[in-house]
Image: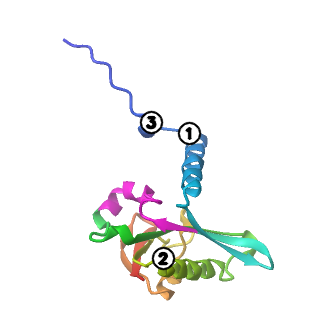
Amino acid sequence: MHNHQPRPLPESKRPQSSAKRAARNRRQKRKLVENGRSHGILVYAKGEPVGWCQFGRKEELPRIDNNLTYRKLAPTGDVNRLWRITCFVVARNHRRRGVASAALKAVLEVIRKNGGGLVEAYPITRWGAYSEYRGTVSMFKKKGFKIEAPLGKNNVVMRRTI
């Protein structure tokens, strides 16, 4: 009988505290910024930043690839030109004033100027979902996105080509 000790998980697979995850995420984001591979749009009102939208190519924003439901929906073909819109942040006193829509419009223009491609988003289907920062279905529909499939209980995958 062999007494095998379980092999420790690699550091990237070990459970981490939220503080350690946040620190790791900041390091990864800093590396993307330093390499010119991080994309974001800032929205200003009267010279003050009031909103932000994160977007980028597939390899810059790979977290969604770990979602088992998404893997079944992942696009095939020329995924080198796959863009993702993953996050909106709007200052509390500027919400429901079109800030996120203005950011989305600017993001789509930047993507178009950079050669376009398939653009994905993962908006919420109901308010109160923890992932409200992903935008709303109606906002994306107004910009020509179509719902591809549900993504969990509170989100959908939406796509359009630019």
Q: Position of residue 82 (x, y in %)?
A: 39, 70
Judged left or right of residue 106, residue 43 is right
Q: Nearer the viewer, residue 106 or 63?
A: 106
Q: Position of residue 61 (x, y in %)?
A: 47, 60
Distance from the alpha carbon under mark 1 to that under mark 2? 37 Å
Q: Quadrant of the C terminus?
A: bottom left
> Circle 3 sits in a helix, a strand or a loop, which is it?
loop
Residue that badge 3 annotates? 14
Residue 144 within the segment the image draws in magenta = no
Which amino acid type is marked by label 1?
A: Ser
Q: Which of the two marks, 1 or 2, is nearer to us in this view?
A: 2
Which amino acid type is marked by label 3?
A: Arg
Q: Position of residue 125 (x, y in %)?
A: 48, 73
The boundaries of the magenta stretch are 54-71
Judged left or right of residue 99, residue 64 is left
Q: Residue furthest left?
A: 1
Distance from the alpha carbon under mark 3 to that under mark 2? 37 Å
Residue that badge 1 annotates? 17
